[in-house]
Image (cartoon, rainbow, N blue to C red):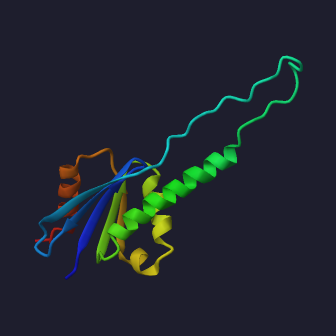
């Protein structure tokens, strides 16, 4: 059975649409990410004795590494959900689709099944399903 999958992704969630052999929607699955938002931390605080002394500053590299790890975990969940697909299309408004493609490139079998990647605005689950059905519809 050749399974066609389309997914819409951003950094908050992924909507995965699976089609059956006749081209109808078999399932729609949503995966929420657990990626924390970027928080801007203010610099440290000064003491009363040395008002112009050094400030302890929070490490931005630790926050960036944490965000990267959370992103990779989210993309791995999405890849597991589409691992058995014959053809995959990826849609989304931002850079998450590009980051997912890079993560998919680590697995040759999955990266070969990717047939299309395009930009589109926010969509409902039904809109995503309709776009996927239209993409995989047989040409008359």
Q: Image check: 14 left or right of 56?
A: left
Q: Image check: 62 left or right of 133?
A: right
How many numbered discs, if any?
A: 0
Q: Position of residue 118 (x, y in %)?
A: 36, 57
- Picture residue at 84% right of the left edge, 17% below the top: 48
Front residue (pair 11, 121): 11
Q: Please identify the quadrant where the C terminus is shown.
A: bottom left
The part of the image, by quadrant, that contains residue 4 is: bottom left
Q: Please identify the quadrant where the N terminus is shown.
A: bottom left
- Picture residue at 18% right of the left edge, 51% below the top: 126
Q: Image check: 99 left or right of 44?
A: left
Q: Is residue 56 above or below residue 82?
A: above
The part of the image, by quadrant, that contains residue 109 is: bottom left
Front residue (pair 62, 111): 62
Q: Is residue 137 above or below residue 128?
A: below
Q: Position of residue 82 (x, y in %)?
A: 33, 69
Front residue (pair 62, 99): 62
Q: Image check: 124 left or right of 41?
A: left
- Picture residue at 47% right of the left edge, 77% below the top: 107
Q: Position of residue 12 (x, y in %)?
A: 39, 47
Q: Position of residue 11 (x, y in %)?
A: 43, 49
- Picture residue at 35% right of the left edge, 61% below the top: 90
Front residue (pair 7, 121): 7
């Amino acid at each position: 059975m050749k399974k066609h999958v389309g997914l819409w992704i951003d950094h908050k969630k992924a909507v995965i649409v699976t089609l059956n052999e006749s081209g109808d929607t078999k399932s729609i699955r949503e995966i929420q990410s657990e990626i924390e938002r970027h928080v801007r931390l203010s610099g440290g605080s000064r003491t009363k004795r040395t008002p112009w002394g050094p400030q302890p500053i929070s490490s931005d590299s630790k926050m960036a590494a944490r965000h990267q790890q959370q992103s990779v975990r989210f993309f791995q969940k999405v890849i597991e959900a589409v691992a058995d697909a014959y053809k995959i299309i990826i849609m989304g408004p931002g850079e998450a689709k590009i980051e997912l493609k890079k993560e998919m490139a680590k697995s040759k079998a999955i990266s070969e099944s990717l047939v299309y990647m395009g930009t589109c605005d926010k969509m409902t689950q039904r809109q995503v399903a309709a776009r996927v059905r239209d993409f995989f519809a047989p040409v008359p």
